[in-house]
């Protein structure tokens, strides 16, 4: 116990003797570590901030165009977590192929829709939903406007024929009648999937773009990767933003490591100056019988204490900056983000890099204690 007490007294005396170097070394290390940790904090959270912002401006999900996919192969995406898959816009259909009985419907505006679960005001019959996109019992449902119903005297359950060719006819069954102002602009709406399947049966190509909806922007990259693994190509207006943010993430992380390394090197040089300044004292301690490991303990304790204190103050500074960053993000983007991460994850890295200083300092002390030119060390030189 007495030995340890003497060592701690020596530590205190060394701190008092070199207080200027130790103070400025700790101050410089704190500032540089705070900068490095905050840059790492930005690197770790820049993507999550944008993801929250993207979710706020796209509450219904992010649309991703899927190129190279035909609607008869949509099933290949069943294992991918899309909120839904849809066609981007209605497909116009040639109305001169449609008949109700012997009456041609060539004056009607007919489109194929990808129906969604929406509030639709149906005057008669059933409303539409996503389930309407798949024909049941080989009966393809259609919805017609109130005007067309009155003009051609078409009622619920009536059959509309599409003369695809001289040999092939398709039949659609009226499922509901809607008001033009409450439903869609067309006179007759056909489920896109059923129409696509019908055209595929006769070898006709339906020009369309298919989109998948990603409910949460954080899954954007992984879902796009899964789609590309199936030989398909995805495109979204967010692609360029995600690419730039990923590049910035890597850049900020490299910059934070660079600043930490510079901090460790600078602090190491300050420690070397302290040891060089205390060569006479170290050799005197050596002559008086103090062992090398005790000398290393004294200076190692001072260095480690300085590193720990610097990390503590750097963390406090970054926590304060974190709170300020959260406030700025909330005021700028209108999104509430709390508990942003990145500080605790980076501190061990900073601690390890800074402790490399100990190795260099121990090497310097070892070199000093091994010197044999004791007289020249104690000579006073200008």
Image (cartoon, rainbow, N blue to C red):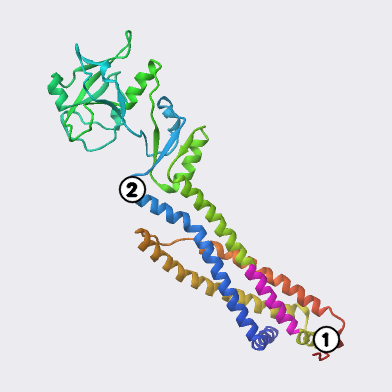
Q: Position of residue 261 (x, y in %)?
A: 64, 66
Residue sitting at x 33%, y 11%: 165
Instruction: Say whether residue 262 is left or right of residue 187.
Output: right
Q: Which mark is residue 115?
A: none
What span is colored magenta in the figure?
262-278
Mark count: 2
The quarter in which the N terminus is drawn is bottom right
In the image, 134: left or right of 357?
left
**In the rendering, which numbered label is found on residue 377?**
1
Q: Which quadrant holds residue 70?
A: top left
Residue 24 percent across, percent down from the top left: 61, 81
Q: Secondary structure at mark 2?
A: loop
State if disc 1 and disc 2 touch (CB < 8 Å): no
Decide which of 103, 233 is in the foreground and name it: 103
Q: Is residue 48 above or below residue 97?
A: below
Q: Which residue is mark 2?
A: 59
- What residue occupies the far top of the structure in this picture? 167
Residue 268 part of the magenta segment: yes
């Amino acid at each position: 116990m007495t030995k340890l007490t003497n060592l701690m007294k020596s530590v205190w005396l060394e701190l008092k003797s070199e207080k200027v170097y130790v103070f400025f070394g700790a101050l410089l290390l704190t500032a540089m570590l705070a900068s490095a940790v905050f840059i790492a904090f930005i690197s770790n959270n820049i993507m999550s901030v944008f993801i929250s912002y993207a979710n706020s401006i796209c509450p219904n999900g992010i649309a991703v165009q899927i190129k190279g996919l035909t609607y008869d192969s949509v099933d290949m995406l069943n294992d991918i977590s899309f909120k839904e898959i849809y066609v981007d816009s209605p497909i116009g259909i040639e109305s001169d192929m449609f008949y109700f009985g012997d009456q041609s419907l060539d004056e009607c505006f007919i489109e194929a829709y990808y129906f969604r679960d929406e509030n639709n005001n149906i005057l008669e019959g059933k409303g539409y939903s996503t389930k309407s996109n798949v024909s049941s019992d080989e009966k393809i449902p259609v919805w017609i406007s109130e005007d067309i119903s009155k003009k051609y005297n078409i009622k619920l359950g009536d059959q509309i024929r599409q003369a695809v060719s001289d040999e092939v006819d398709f039949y659609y069954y009226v499922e509901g009648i809607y008001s033009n102002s409450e439903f869609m602009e067309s006179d007759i709406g056909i489920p896109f999937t059923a129409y696509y399947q019908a055209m595929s049966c006769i070898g006709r190509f339906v020009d369309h773009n298919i989109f998948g909806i990603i409910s949460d922007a954080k899954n954007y990259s992984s879902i796009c990767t899964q789609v590309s693994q199936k030989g398909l190509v995805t495109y979204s207006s967010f692609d360029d933003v995600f690419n730039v943010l990923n590049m910035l993430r890597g850049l900020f992380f490299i910059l934070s490591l660079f600043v930490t390394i510079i901090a460790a090197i600078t602090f190491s040089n300050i420690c070397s100056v302290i040891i060089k300044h205390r060569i006479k004292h170290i050799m005197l301690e050596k002559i008086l019988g103090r062992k090398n490991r005790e000398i290393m303990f004294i200076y190692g304790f001072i260095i480690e204490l300085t590193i720990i204190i610097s990390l503590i103050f750097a963390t406090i500074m970054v926590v304060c900056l974190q709170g300020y960053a959260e406030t700025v993000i909330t005021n700028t983007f209108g999104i509430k983000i709390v508990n942003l991460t990145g500080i605790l994850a980076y501190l061990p890295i900073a601690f390890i890099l800074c402790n490399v200083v100990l190795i260099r300092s121990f090497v310097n002390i070892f070199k000093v204690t091994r010197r044999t030119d004791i007289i020249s060390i104690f000579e006073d030189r200008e």
